[in-house]
């Protein structure tokens, strides 16, 4: 946890951008009956029946200090899908960066091994050398700001029935463009010092004998 908090304290550096990555899914749902139109004093009304029309994955890449995000809609969330997103970050989004400081949760596909599954060893190594990887702890994915940005996307754009992947991609692209136009940033306020007080229960408890030795040494 403290590793992630220290990363978030870093000032903005275009040569070493801090990028958070996370993924989510969205089920596509078709209507089986036309919704009733909006009327005076009545919202648009939908029938409780619907038709499932597949599930799409959404990769969220978010640079909080720059107010930039990109959402890629894919069919799957495999190791190779993750590797393709990371390659895009290295080749297309930040080709001039010294290192991309990549923050993500500890899902098993979020690893250097995934690059070697997707690309030839030389290419996998080239991509990896452009990354500085940081992982949130187990049960600590809330530390990944991309997860927060996905929650905003869900509330502002996806909290309704979307019939197919084409519509989903169009709606997500419009949301992304609006957020990026306004350069909607995110300020992180939880520091390492605050965490040691507010989240004290997450830290291991040292035996009294060790604590006493530390006090004497101090």
Image (cartoon, helix red, strand yellow):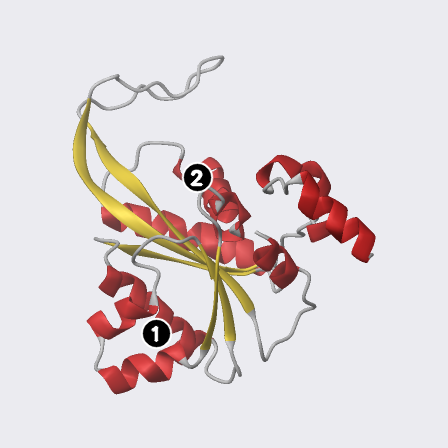
Per the model, the C-alpha gap separating discs 2 and 1 is: 26 Å
* Residue 167 placement (x, y as % from top left): 29, 46
**Residue of label 2:** 154
Q: Secondary structure at mark 2?
A: helix
Lateral position of residue 33 relative to residue 40, left or right: left
Is label 2 or label 1 in front?
1
173 in relation to 96, above or below: above
Lateral position of residue 157 relative to residue 18, left or right: left
The one of 20 and 155 positioned closer to us in this rendering: 20
Is residue 57 visible in the rendered image? The answer is yes
- Count residues near mark 1 (Cα–Cα under 10 Å), then give few for <14, some for 14-19, many for 20+: some
- Count residues near mark 2 (Cα–Cα under 10 Å), then give few for <14, some for 14-19, many for 20+: some
Q: Earlier in the sequence, mark 2 or mark 1?
A: 1
176 in relation to 18, above or below: above
Q: Quadrant of the C terminus?
A: bottom right
The one of 166 and 155 positioned closer to us in this rendering: 155
| Residue at figure coordinates x 51%, y 78% from the top left | 99
* Residue 150 placement (x, y as % from top left): 45, 46
| Residue at figure coordinates x 23%, y 57% from the top left | 78
**Residue of label 1:** 87
Q: Which label belongs to residue 109?
A: none
* Residue 52 placement (x, y as % from top left): 17, 32
* Residue 96 placement (x, y as % from top left): 50, 85
The one of 197 and 162 positioned closer to us in this rendering: 197
189 in relation to 162, above or below: below
Q: Secondary structure at mark 1?
A: helix
**Residue lying farthest top?**
41
| Residue at figure coordinates x 45%, y 41% from the top left | 139
The one of 41 and 184 positioned closer to us in this rendering: 184
How many circles with numbers are drawn on the protein?
A: 2
């Amino acid at each position: 946890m403290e590793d992630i908090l220290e990363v978030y304290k870093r000032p903005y550096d275009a040569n070493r951008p801090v990028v958070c990555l996370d993924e989510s899914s969205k089920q596509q749902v078709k209507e089986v009956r036309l919704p009733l139109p909006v009327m005076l004093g009545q919202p648009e009304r939908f029938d409780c029946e619907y038709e499932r029309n597949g599930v799409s994955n959404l990769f969220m890449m978010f640079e909080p200090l720059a107010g930039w995000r990109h959402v890629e809609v894919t069919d799957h969330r495999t190791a190779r899908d993750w590797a393709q997103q990371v390659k895009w970050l290295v080749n297309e989004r930040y080709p001039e960066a010294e290192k991309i400081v990549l923050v993500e949760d500890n899902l098993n596909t979020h690893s250097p091994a995934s690059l070697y599954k997707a690309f030839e060893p030389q290419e996998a190594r080239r991509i990896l050398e452009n990354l500085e990887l940081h992982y949130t702890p187990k049960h600590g994915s809330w530390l990944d700001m991309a997860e927060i940005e996905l929650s905003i996307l869900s509330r502002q754009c996806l909290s309704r029935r979307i019939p197919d992947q084409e519509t989903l991609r169009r709606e997500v692209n419009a949301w992304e463009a609006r957020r990026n136009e306004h350069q909607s940033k995110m300020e992180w306020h939880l520091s390492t010092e605050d965490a040691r007080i507010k989240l004290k229960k997450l830290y291991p408890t040292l035996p009294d004998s060790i604590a006493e030795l530390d006090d004497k040494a101090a």
